[in-house]
Image (spheres, rainbow, N blue to C red):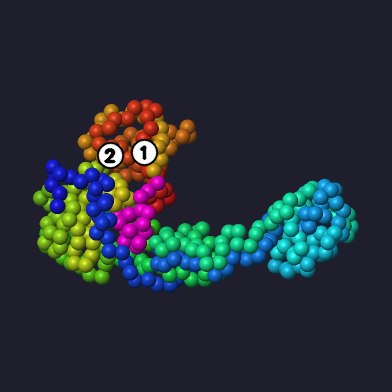
């Protein structure tokens, strides 16, 4: 366990967490149409060529290139081939009217687009010298029989669903959804819809974290708000550990007299990591309770949001066998000055402006959730680093963190 004077860096903390992941093993089969966001459990192979046969990329005329060598050939139209129809072998000295996606008839070796042709009754004038293979999609040009089309651990997006369908896969094997229990500590918390008593605040983290977990396809058990005492927190942890892969808490992981999560985890399980050298989000905890992993997030709304994106999201992805969990980062121009650096790694909320630079939200407090709504992502600022106008900084878009 870390101490206040020996906090782990963000990279060290994430490496430590990911090194302890036990990947889920249970799988299920889902319809390819229902596979969006799921994690592929095993590699998928093609049983056919894509395209299955040579076909045309254009509306036009299928010809023998040698018959059009003059650049002004007049050929009889011998047949008409729409998509889905198998044409007859092409007679020498003739052309076949053909439409996008239709199979190339035997004997033809090029397609001339209709814009380069002129129809004259039952003949066509070809005003072009086509090269052999012109405008023809070759059999297997996209995918060959036996090729691996999708690797295990792939997060299935719309394009992966379409690729699976293109080789005839009506179903896909996927890992079961992670089972996550969440609860929130704080006697000051109230739920939207309730009257806000003096000293109370609405529990925004419940909605933020639920939305983030839903975006990752988790099965969520919400245990609600737990009273600020050790016994209640321990009881909630025991309940959450039953039948879940991960327990997430929000609040109560700092060092105050009313922060009971840390001692509760130490009593019911083990705490492997506590406190990260980052801002916002220093009081982040990680460990295990029973057979479930545990991640304790800070209570401040921005801290909870940022630590989820940087730690919980990659942890849940790795839990499902995804190997590439690091977000895409970009080097972008800072259109602001930052003259008050922290000794910790800072994650500043910023927005891309019309000139392609980054503007900074004026209030970077960990309690100002509107900064996350206003911003397009996070500037990853190393410890003790200032920023001057025009300097290049590392930017992590929310979109690369699964937040759209």
Rendered view: 199 above or below 389: below
Q: CA distance from mark 1 to mark 2?
A: 11 Å
Q: Secondary structure at mark 1?
A: strand
Rendered view: 53 above or below 13: below
Which residue matches tag 1?
394
Which residue matches tag 2?
346
Q: Does the magenta run of residues contain 249?
A: no
Query: Observer-nearest residue: 12 or 175?
Result: 12
Circle on res. 141:
none
Q: Is residue 92 left or right of residue 136?
A: right
Q: Is residue 91 left or right of residue 26?
A: right
Answer few, some or many: residues within 10 Å of disc 1's Cα (few below 14, many 20 plus, some between 14 and 19): some
Upstream in the sequence, badge 1 or badge 2? 2
Q: Residue 4 is drawn in which quadrant?
A: top left
State the image coordinates of residue 229 (x, y, percent, origin top left).
12, 58
Q: Tell me what residue is drawn at x 29 percent, y 54 percent.
A: 312
Q: Secondary structure at mark 2?
A: strand
Q: Tell me what residue is drawn at x 53 percent, y 62 percent.
A: 163
Q: Is residue 33 visible?
A: no
| Identity of the residue furthest to the front in this view | 66
State the image coordinates of residue 49 (x, y, percent, origin top left).
59, 65
Q: Does the magenta run of residues contain 322?
A: yes
Q: How many marks?
A: 2
The magenta region covers: 312-328
| Identity of the residue furthest to the right in this view | 121
Q: Is residue 372 visible?
A: yes
Q: Is residue 58 left or right of residue 45?
A: right
């Amino acid at each position: 366990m870390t101490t206040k004077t020996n906090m782990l860096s963000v990279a060290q903390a994430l490496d430590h967490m990911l090194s302890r992941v036990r990947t889920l093993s249970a799988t299920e089969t889902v319809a390819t149409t229902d596979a969006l966001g799921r994690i592929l459990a095993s590699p998928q192979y093609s049983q056919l060529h894509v395209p299955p046969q040579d076909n045309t990329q254009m509306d036009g005329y299928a010809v023998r290139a040698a018959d059009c060598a003059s650049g002004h050939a007049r050929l009889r139209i011998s047949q008409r081939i729409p998509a889905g129809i198998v044409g007859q072998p092409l007679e020498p000295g003739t052309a076949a009217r053909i439409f996008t996606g239709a199979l190339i008839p035997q004997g033809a070796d090029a397609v001339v687009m209709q814009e380069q042709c002129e129809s004259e009754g039952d003949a066509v004038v070809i005003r072009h010298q086509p090269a052999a293979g012109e405008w023809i999609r070759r059999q297997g040009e996209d995918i060959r029989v036996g090729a691996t089309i999708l690797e295990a651990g792939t997060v299935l997006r719309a394009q992966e669903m379409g690729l699976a369908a293109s080789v005839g896969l009506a179903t896909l094997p996927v890992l079961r959804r992670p089972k996550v229990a969440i609860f929130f500590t704080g006697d000051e918390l109230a739920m939207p819809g309730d009257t806000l008593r003096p000293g109370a605040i609405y529990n925004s983290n419940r909605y933020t974290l639920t939305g983030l977990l839903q975006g990752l396809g988790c099965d969520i058990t919400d245990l609600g708000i737990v009273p600020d005492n050790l016994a209640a927190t321990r009881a909630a942890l025991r309940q959450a550990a039953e039948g879940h892969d991960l327990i997430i808490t929000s609040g109560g992981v700092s060092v105050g007299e009313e922060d009971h999560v840390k001692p509760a985890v130490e009593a019911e399980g083990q705490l492997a990591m506590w406190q990260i050298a980052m801002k916002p989000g220093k009081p982040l905890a990680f460990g295990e309770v029973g057979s479930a992993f545990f991640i304790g997030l800070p209570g401040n709304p921005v801290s909870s949001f940022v630590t989820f994106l940087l730690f919980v999201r990659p942890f849940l992805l790795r839990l499902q066998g995804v190997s590439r969990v690091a977000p895409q980062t970009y080097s972008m121009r800072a259109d602001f000055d930052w003259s008050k650096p922290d000794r910790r790694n800072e994650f500043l909320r910023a927005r891309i402006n019309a000139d392609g630079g980054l503007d900074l939200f004026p209030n970077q407090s960990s309690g100002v959730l509107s900064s996350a709504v206003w911003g397009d992502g996070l500037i990853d600022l190393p410890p003790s680093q200032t920023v001057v106008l025009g300097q290049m900084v590392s930017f992590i878009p929310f979109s690369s963190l699964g937040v759209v």
